[in-house]
């Protein structure tokens, strides 16, 4: 029997097809994995934006005269810390997708969220009064007092 007979030719052809198909399936699975990580990135952005909204809503209610609630403040701070913690675990998966040649939708927006959350968490760790010079703290406090006294005007 020679390598030119029908069985060998078919075996080579089927092995070639099988090999190519398994490579296609592998690449397809990698692409689907990329889509799943894109969805996680979208969820991260949404979670970040909702946490910012919750923080802003709470702060507006304080400026409108509601009492400060330490439990709410701590919970919001916890959400910021949690977001940063979860995102740190996401980073290796993002890197793997990039190294695989995949372009992740909304990655730049996600990176902006990471930058913002790092600054927010840093300010939480340092405390608000430590992040501003004394002169700016005085101006900030005076502006808050003027707002509460109705002494400010709206520009819009």
Image (cartoon, rainbow, N blue to C red):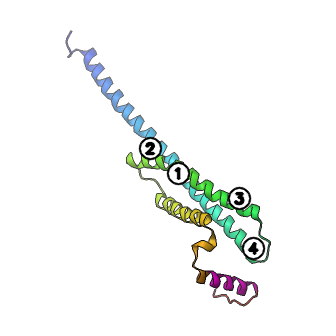
Q: Is residue 121 above or below residue 15?
A: below
1 or 4: tag closer to the N-terminus: 4
- Viewer-side residue, 3 vs 23: 23
Tell me whether circle 1 and circle 4 mark residues in contact (CB < 8 Å): no
The quarter of the picture where the C terminus appears is bottom right
Tell me whether circle 3 and circle 4 mark residues in contact (CB < 8 Å): no
Q: Is residue 68 left or right of residue 56?
A: right
Displayed quadrant of residue 150: bottom right
**Secondary structure under the numbered disc 3 in the rendered image:** helix
Q: Which residue is mark 4?
A: 62
Q: Residue at x 67, y 85 (%)?
A: 143
- Label 4, label 2: how far apart the Cα atoms are: 47 Å
Q: Nearer the viewer, mark 3 or mark 2?
A: 3
Looking at the picture, how far across and down is residue 34, in whole percent? 47, 46
Q: Nearer the viewer, mark 4 or mark 2?
A: 4
1 or 2: tag closer to the N-terminus: 2
Q: Is residue 76 left or right of residue 2?
A: right
**Secondary structure under the numbered disc 2 in the rendered image:** helix
Question: What segment carries the magenta color?
Answer: 137-148
- Viewer-side residue, 106 vs 12: 106
Q: Is residue 87 above or below residue 19?
A: below
**Residue 31 has which mark?**
2
**Residue 75 has which mark?**
3
- Callout 1 environment at 10 Å: few (<14), some (14 to 19), or many (20+)? few
**Secondary structure under the numbered disc 1 in the rendered image:** helix
- Label 3, label 4: how far apart the Cα atoms are: 16 Å
Q: Which residue is mark 1?
A: 88
3 or 4: tag closer to the N-terminus: 4
- Callout 4 environment at 10 Å: few (<14), some (14 to 19), or many (20+)? few
Q: Residue at x 57, y 79 (%)?
A: 133
């Amino acid at each position: 029997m020679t390598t030119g007979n029908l069985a060998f030719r078919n075996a080579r052809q089927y092995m070639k097809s099988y090999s190519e198909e398994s490579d296609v399936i592998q690449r397809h699975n990698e692409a689907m994995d990329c889509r799943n990580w894109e969805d996680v990135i979208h969820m991260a952005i949404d979670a970040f934006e909702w946490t910012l909204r919750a923080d802003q809503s709470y702060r507006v209610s304080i400026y409108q005269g509601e009492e400060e609630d330490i439990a709410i403040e701590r919970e919001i701070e916890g959400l910021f810390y949690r977001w940063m913690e979860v995102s740190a675990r996401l980073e290796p998966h993002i890197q793997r997708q990039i190294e695989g040649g995949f372009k992740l939708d909304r990655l730049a927006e996600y990176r902006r969220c990471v930058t913002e959350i790092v600054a927010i968490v840093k300010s939480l760790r340092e405390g608000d009064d430590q992040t501003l010079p004394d002169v700016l703290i005085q101006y900030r406090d005076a502006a808050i007092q003027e707002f509460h006294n109705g002494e400010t005007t709206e520009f819009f």
